[in-house]
Image (tube, rainbow, N blue to C red):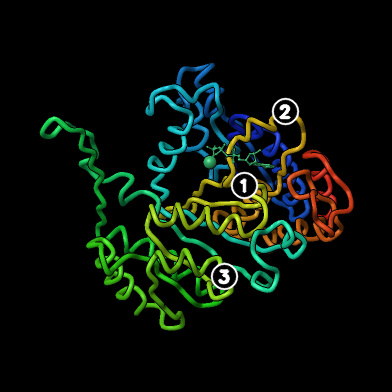
Amino acid sequence: MKLKIAVLPGDGIGPEVVRQAIKVINVISKKFGHEVEIKEGIVGGIAIDNFGDPLPEETWKICEESDAILLGAVGGPKWDNLPGDKRPEKALLRLRSGFNLFANIRPIPIFDELIFSSPIKEDYLKGVDFVIVRELTGGLYFGKPKETRIENGEEVAIDTMIYRASEIRRIAHVAFRMAQKRKKKVTSVDKANILECSRLWRKIVEEVSKEYIDVTLEHMYVDNCAMQIVRNPKQFDVILTENTFGDILSDEAAIITGSIGMLPSASLGETKKGLYEPIHGSAPDIAGQNIANPIATILSVALMFRYSFDLENEAKLIENSVRKILSLGYFTKDLFNNNPYAKKLVSTEEMGDLICSAI
Ligand code: ATP
Ligand code: MG
């Protein structure tokens, strides 16, 4: 199979972690006999510095012509004071809306070796394995009107939460299809006791669930869900939720795994083309030191093989190789401290090489 991949390293630790991910792409493709065509594009702050645009035309073209996009991270203090529509992060929003990537998938894997880095107690964590499916292009973040105006001499700010049935339906299908391949349970999270949008959400999700009789559906209020994620995370398989709730819950879920440097994400649409990136940012505080953890980006490559190329064996092998290296006690700096499983402190490059050798 020929794999056409756009790679956008970006800023800060982005290029360092992406370099390791490229090694993994090459090694796994060679092993399984796939031809890879990787094209690199400039994105984020570095693109602003060189082209005055966080997502230059040339980069967009590279993404358009590829089957999947791998992104490092964008942004940093140098660009923090630019106006909203000129900031590095704008590139991400343009990629998401340009390719209609409405479903954000964040698996929450628990690695036994990292349980000591988690704020949650060991008994609650063993065997935890769930996915958050977050609606990415609707709701409060995009609804109009969205403005601040003066009323009776006072500033008044308005955000609008708006959802169309069709938007809810398509993300619900993503969640149910995913649950069919997993533990066959969807927890739909809303605030239907208060919000109009949530009432429509619940109604449409109920309708969609009738097409998936092998999947159990339960509804949960978002405040309760926030509590359950730390109280009993084992109960979840697929959490389906709207944009704002998903943003908050996925960060909460991320911290129970032990390190932000471990977590991958996928943003998907109606087609197979997806955008894959670690959930962490550009981490300017550790950039250029060869100490960043590349695993989140490497696990994002696994998601790419799974969702964009339907190559499940390749995805599994990448994930198992990460597990293998952790079980041997090779940890980057973010994981190393106070962890009884830690045996050898390794650099970004070394971690990439170790995972490649395990593959
Ligand atoms: P953004 O706004 O882009 O999300 P941020 O400053 O909010 O950026 P991160 O860039 O994710 O967040 O950094 C948060 C903290 O986590 C920093 O201290 C950073 O060094 C650390 N961190 C982030 N990613 C990694 C990684 N891959 N390996 C090790 N440490 C990391
Ligand atoms: Mg952040």
Q: Is residue 29 left or right of residue 192?
A: right
Q: Please tell me which residue lies in front, 101 or 112.
A: 112
> Type of residue at label 1?
Leu
Closer to viewer: mark 2 or mark 3: 3
Q: Position of residue 4 (x, y in %)?
A: 59, 43
Dot 1 or dot 2: first in sequence order is 1
> Is 34 located above or below residue 10 in the figure?
below
In the current view of this chain or complex, which residue is farthest to the right?
343
Residue 117 position by quadrant: bottom right
Residue 95 position by quadrant: top left
Q: Is residue 83 left or right of residue 229?
A: left
Q: Position of residue 146 (x, y in %)?
A: 24, 39
Closer to viewer: mark 1 or mark 2: 2
Near mark 1 (Cα within 10 A), the count class, few <14, some 14-19 or many ≥20, is: some
Residue visible at 24% across and 39% down in the picture = 157
Assess mark 3: CB under 8 A from ligand 1? no
Q: Residue under label 1, please give it.
A: 3
> Is 207 located above or below residue 324 in the figure?
below
Q: Residue under label 2, please give it.
A: 288
> Type of residue at label 3?
Pro
